Image (cartoon, rainbow, N blue to C red):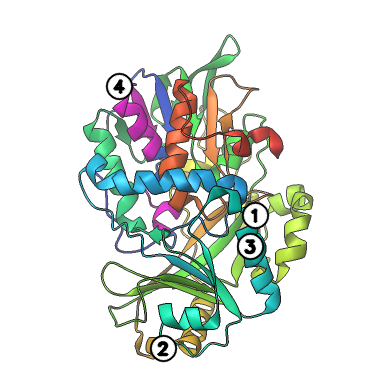
């Protein structure tokens, strides 16, 4: 993980009862806890490891509407409003800047995809605009890339993942939420056909509702309850440079690199055209549901068969409430960064913008993404287990919408008017 992750001090005492239990201490879970605490709803958040130690601190920090499914854009718009209100709401800055996001096209085929997306969101009246090569040079000077064009959304931006979730967690605790780290939830307890509590490694907590926001672990937790949630893992490797003079504060995504300014003056860089795809047993069980994605995105995947498969096979898929679970065996999913992909991204970036010839790598990390068949999350109640709600499967783009996703989940749990229409995130669509 990034060495810049801000640690959180939480409670060690597990209460006997509460109204809502949240499983998972990422940005969605802690934002839901904050929203519930602001409504004076008793809530306990349980994290098997450390707050924000997995993908919520390992992502790129991008906050975008650009290139999202049209049905997902309203949540991104709602998130923009919540990001802007964040300093007042939680009492500190999380580095949020609407510096803009730009995507670049090297071929007419790539440009056609951006043009089609731009047309698809026309009714939403975004500030996105198509760019010519001259427009790219004007906004991001000093480039040497042969771009056909691009797309740019000035109201997009970024924040700092290493501090955001931790800051929200501290605010939630100040407003009455109880957060507990190093405490895995093993399973649910049921009474009269509905959720009545959770069993953790430290004992039982009685509650009325449970929100599962467990990221890549959600599939395994639900499977033990007889619920099949289709997600598969991908690994994204990231590097951060030392402070340097770069070409722009705009976040830029090319076909085989991306970069954005870090608050310390360096840049966050990744190989946007490649992700590691470690084969697991789930690929054999549900891989057929991803055939459409595979046909269009095969070139993006660096498929590997090896240690990840064997480690996955060794991990339990069924357990009882009195047995140790996978969540206690692996407190933090901590994949090793692919330094070859990181170096490739940096080399590609140096070719496109020679200013990065001076870049020196400060650190590198990787994060595991939980990807659904349509790359959209599930934020919904589980009808087969009344009282259970899920907010998971964000497919690598959950940080940007995290504040709105967490609030939507809290709205559903508490039965109030949802911040947006939840229909695009129904479990039944998968």
Residue on which the image places disc 3: 278
Distance of label 2 from label 3 (alpha carbons): 37 Å
In the image, taking residue 180 as reference, residue 192 lies left or right, namely: right
Residue 227 at what x, y percent from top left?
66, 32
Residue on which the image places disc 1: 120
Residue on which the image places disc 2: 142
Q: Is mark 3 on a helix, strand or loop?
A: strand
Depth order, front residue of 424/238: 424
Q: Is residue 389 above or below residue 305?
A: above
Residue on which the image places disc 4: 40
The reply to whether the C-beta atoms of the residues labelled 1 and 4 are less than 8 Å apart is: no
Q: What element carries label 1?
A: helix
**Disc nearer the start of the sequence (2/3):** 2
- The magenta region covers 31-58
Within 10 angstroms of label 1, few (less than 14), some, or many (20 or more) residues?
A: few
Distance of label 1 from label 3 (alpha carbons): 33 Å
Distance of label 1 from label 4 (alpha carbons): 40 Å
Depth order, front residue of 259/275: 259
**Disc nearer the start of the sequence (4/3):** 4
Q: Which residue is drawn at 37% across and 39% down?
A: 30
Report the number of numbered marks.
4
Q: Residue at x 54, y 25 (%)?
A: 388
């Amino acid at each position: 993980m990034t060495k810049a992750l801000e640690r959180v001090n939480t409670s060690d005492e597990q209460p006997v009862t509460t109204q809502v239990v949240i499983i998972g201490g990422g940005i969605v879970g802690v934002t839901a806890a904050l929203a519930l605490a602001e409504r004076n709803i008793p809530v306990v958040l349980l994290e098997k490891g450390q707050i924000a130690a997995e993908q919520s601190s390992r992502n790129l920090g991008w906050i975008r509407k650009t290139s999202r499914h049209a049905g997902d854009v309203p949540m991104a718009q709602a998130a923009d409003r919540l990001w802007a209100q964040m300093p007042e709401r939680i009492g500190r800055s999380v580095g949020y800047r609407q510096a803009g996001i730009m995507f670049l096209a090297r071929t007419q085929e790539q440009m056609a995809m951006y043009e089609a997306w731009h047309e698809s969101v026309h009714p939403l009246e975004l500030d996105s605009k198509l760019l010519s090569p001259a427009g790219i040079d004007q906004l991001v000077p000093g480039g040497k890339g042969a771009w056909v064009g691009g797309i740019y959304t000035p109201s997009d931006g970024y924040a700092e993942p290493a501090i955001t979730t931790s800051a929200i967690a501290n605010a939630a605790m100040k407003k009455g939420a109880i957060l507990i780290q190093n405490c895995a939830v093993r399973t649910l307890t049921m009474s009269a056909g509905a959720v009545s509590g959770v069993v953790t490694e430290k004992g039982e907590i009685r509650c009325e509702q449970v929100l599962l926001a467990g990221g890549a672990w959600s599939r395994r937790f639900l499977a033990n309850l007889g619920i099949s949630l289709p997600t598969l893992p991908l690994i994204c490797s990231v590097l951060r440079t030392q402070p340097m003079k770069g070409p722009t504060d705009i976040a830029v995504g090319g076909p085989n690199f991306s970069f954005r300014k870090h608050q310390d003056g360096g840049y966050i860089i990744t190989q946007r055209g490649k992700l590691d795809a470690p084969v697991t047993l789930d690929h054999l069980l549900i891989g057929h549901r991803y055939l459409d994605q595979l046909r269009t995105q095969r070139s993006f995947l660096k498929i590997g068969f090896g240690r990840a498969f064997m480690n996955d096979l060794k991990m339990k898929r069924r357990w009882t409430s009195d047995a140790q679970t996978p969540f206690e065996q692996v407190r933090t999913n901590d994949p090793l960064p692919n330094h070859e992909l990181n170096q490739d991204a940096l080399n590609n970036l140096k070719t496109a913008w020679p200013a990065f010839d001076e870049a020196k790598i400060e650190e590198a990390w990787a994060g595991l993404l939980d990807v659904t068949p349509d790359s959209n999350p599930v934020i919904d109640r589980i009808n087969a287990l009344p009282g259970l709600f899920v907010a998971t499967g964000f497919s690598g783009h959950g940080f940007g919408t995290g504040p709105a996703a967490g609030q939507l989940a809290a709205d559903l749990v508490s039965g109030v008017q949802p911040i947006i229409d939840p229909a695009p995130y129904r479990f039944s669509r998968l």
